[in-house]
Image: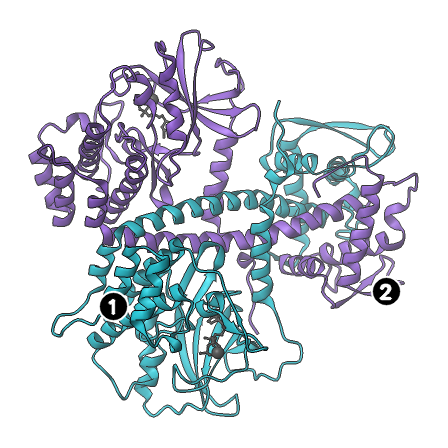
Chain colours: A purple, B cyan
Amino acid sequence: PYERTTSDFFIPEDVRIDLTKKNEAANQVMPNSQLPQLDNYHSLVPLDTTHRKNASIFGYNSWVYKAKATRTGTVVCLRRLQDFRLSNEHAIRSVKEWRRIVSANVVQTHDAFTTRMFGDSSLVFVQDFHPLSQTLAEAHLATSSHGGRFAQKNPIQESVLWSYITQIATALKAIHGKDLAARCIDVTKIILTDARANRIRLGACSILDVVHYEARRPVAELQQEDFINFGRVILSLATNTHPSNLNNINGSIEQLSRVYSVELRDTVLWLLSPQQPPAQKGIEEFMRGIALHAFAQLDVEEQGRDADKSHLSTALENGRQFRLMLKLAAINERHELNGDPNWSENGERYLLKLFRDYCFHQVDADGNPVLDVYHMITCLGKLEAGSEEKVCLTSRDEQTSFVVSYKELKKQLGSAFGDLQKASKQAKGL
Amino acid sequence: PYERTTSDFFIPEDVRIDLTKKNEAANQVMPNSQLPQLDNYHSLVPLDTTHRKNASIFGYNSWVYKAKATRTGTVVCLRRLQDFRLSNEHAIRSVKEWRRIVSANVVQTHDAFTTRMFGDSSLVFVQDFHPLSQTLAEAHLATSSHGGRFAQKNPIQESVLWSYITQIATALKAIHGKDLAARCIDVTKIILTDARANRIRLGACSILDVVHYEARRPVAELQQEDFINFGRVILSLATNTHPSNLNNINGSIEQLSRVYSVELRDTVLWLLSPQQPPAQKGIEEFMRGIALHAFAQLDVEEQGRDADKSHLSTALENGRQFRLMLKLAAINERHELNGDPNWSENGERYLLKLFRDYCFHQVDADGNPVLDVYHMITCLGKLEAGSEEKVCLTSRDEQTSFVVSYKELKKQLGSAFGDLQKASKQAKGL
Ligand SMILES: Nc1ncnc2c1ncn2[C@@H]1O[C@H](COP(=O)(O)OP(=O)(O)OP(=O)(O)O)[C@@H](O)[C@H]1O
Ligand SMILES: Nc1ncnc2c1ncn2[C@@H]1O[C@H](COP(=O)(O)OP(=O)(O)OP(=O)(O)O)[C@@H](O)[C@H]1O
Ligand SMILES: [Mg+2]
Ligand SMILES: [Mg+2]
């Protein structure tokens, strides 16, 4: 005979911890926050860990917050540009275009608005929130620590770089395909939203479309720039160099070649080399060139998804049994119903109480408790399934025994819970 | 203020039903089965829904069963070839090669063995089991019903066909890349393992390597045949024609062109056209040709995976609270511990009992029960998190109140459960 271990009943520890931390991060609050409450968003928590101000990318100091949408209760990410004055009402409407970009590798943009709530005139972008994200720079690039020395990071595996390349290409396909340009392909504006799966997303598209609305440039030109910035991101990651320090491109390419394949080098070179107008680079041409990597990534993603699905299936069994336990708990030992102080002890409820004892309060021959999750879960599983199997329930004084099928118990649980619901003016959701 | 609805606390109904059905299918048993118990596998359930015998593919009648592996308790899929006599011991070892093929689009092969348990001499292949799979033929091709008429199916969307094409290409890449050939690309041997996600897997590779072991042919030749069979599968699906009825290829191509794009037609033509030796077709060449579809599929898969992950996260919260409830249930009203009949009523256990009342037995001002899942789940969530928040617990006679933080309650739960575990000779898994 075989034995299922209790780990078959629950989700693997590492997966659980990872998701738990993400949940906690999404629900985190700041008790004595000085941050304002906005019209449609509250409970702001700052996500910028450094207090360094850096206006180099948008031309304005920018701040990132987690916040809760008042109407829906969903958690969102807000990016605020400080001291921004909107000179043209149309500018902000260009965000609308970005709402249509739905891609696994682009952070979804929802809205933009101006506000004076921060004590200045700010422009705020509303995006999906991805808990515990890090920028590619944070995740991979050496940072000067307080002592002024550099914290060296390990070189990135080539397979991870290819994964990033296919993902940025996927993002650009979605963006260029809708006649937009990303405009902001930068190691500090691409976020790693799932480190275990190497999942990245372009995080700050749409912003420059609003900020530089007046100085509009042809989208074709901006798209060509996207390729060059794409190349710089990969070069920067491959050589562990902040893009601002990428002064000698040939030297960096040289350095890359020493660690990575010719194919990677040629791919980066293609991205970095401008075309002689009127010739233009196209994202589809690029995708064809790296086709095999896309297929490899696809296989990995599908296998990862299979694992996620099987965890979900386990979790679901737990979830169904959890609902059942909520019901049992609402019935067992309830101290009265409809004026009857013995409601929970009488009739079918008495059997449910004995079932609870049988399921959770087992003792061995010497009267020592038996804590056997396998037993608990199998009992609940059979109750859930309404199995024909019979179980012998013994009263506490051991004078009476009842032989009853799980099917009957399930019916009795339904009926007792139905009584409760009928008596209840506020029954929600079970 | 916003309100989370109870649907935020549970997984969407359709996802839940889908996974539940799969779970049920995996756990299904046949009470009065005539099927034998094998050396390492028991509880066989037949998966062939038709009783039609068909030896056309393997040269032997074949049967598919679900079974349980005795040692591990995992559910597997067994494919049995009836009346097969193994003439060469080496033949069966060729399955080893197939164990190394790990791909999202190939059913994983684990083992093969011969047995006389079925009353004949059978060859059995052990594979992963994918609950509620259908063959592509079952899912898409018109079948003659009992009345002899054909049940017409809707034409398959082009995007679905492309998804299938990228997946079969992914499978072939894994197989040809390890110097093997699939040999069995057939609408009845490719299974749809997740219809919601259009996920397919090659289901019967490895079999012909064993069966035709003696008549070995060069693998390069077999790989070239894979392309042609690949083309026939797509043509068959696109024209809703069983492959055995694909007699007029040009006519079928013509028919395909009327519904689908030129690109699809050219892709199928490429697959079907043999090369003039010594020229050979290669899977990588094919992949480059359909690169854009691979990227599209990648985006879809990643978005699907994100959704799965978020369900998993919800389910996980449920799961953690479920564990907590198992503990509470093991303590509350336990009728004695270590000879103390009042154990569950005394000290910290008394508070846990009052907490249970507070969480599950709420009543409104008139004494009617309040069944509020939001309340139950939030209370359990705070207990799980060990929140500093305080809660006022009132005794049943309403004479005494205790103000206690969730943090303290969590500690008390841990300690009471610790007592139980200490007293228990058989504590497993909580
Ligand atoms: N949509 C998002 N969801 C969750 N976290 C995000 C999101 N966008 C950004 N973040 C996180 O917020 C933090 C700050 O982002 P930001 O873009 O300001 O990076 P930065 O390193 O501060 O760059 P800069 O110097 O340009 O401000 C980063 O850790 C990033 O991972
Ligand atoms: N690995 C597997 N896991 C779960 N189900 C499978 C697996 N392999 C096959 N099946 C299912 O078993 C059933 C029988 O498969 P089989 O290959 O015998 O198809 P068939 O239509 O009976 O073809 P044939 O006429 O060649 O026997 C199909 O419904 C198929 O989806
Ligand atoms: Mg910042
Ligand atoms: Mg069959």
> Residue A340, image x and y in percent?
92, 42
Q: Position of residue B88 (x, y in %)?
A: 32, 90
Q: Amino acid at mark 1?
A: His
Residue at the disc numbered 2? A401
Quarter of the displayed picture in which ligand 3 can be seen: top left
SS for tag 2? strand
Q: Residues within 10 Å of mark 1 (few under 14, many from 20)?
A: some
Return the residue nearer the eye: B212 or B425: B212
Image spot of residue B84 (x, y percent)? 41, 90
List the residue tagged with mark 1. B176
Tell me if residue A349 comes above or below residue A400 in the rendering: above
Q: Nearer the viewer, residue B271 or A44?
A: B271
Task: Evaluate if marks 2 and 1 touch, with contact meaning CB atoms under 8 Å apart.
Answer: no
Q: CA distance from mark 2 to mark 1?
A: 64 Å
In the image, residue A132 sits, relative to residue B312, either above or below, namely above
The answer to whether residue B69 is visible is: no
The amino acid type, in three-letter code, at marker 2 is Ser
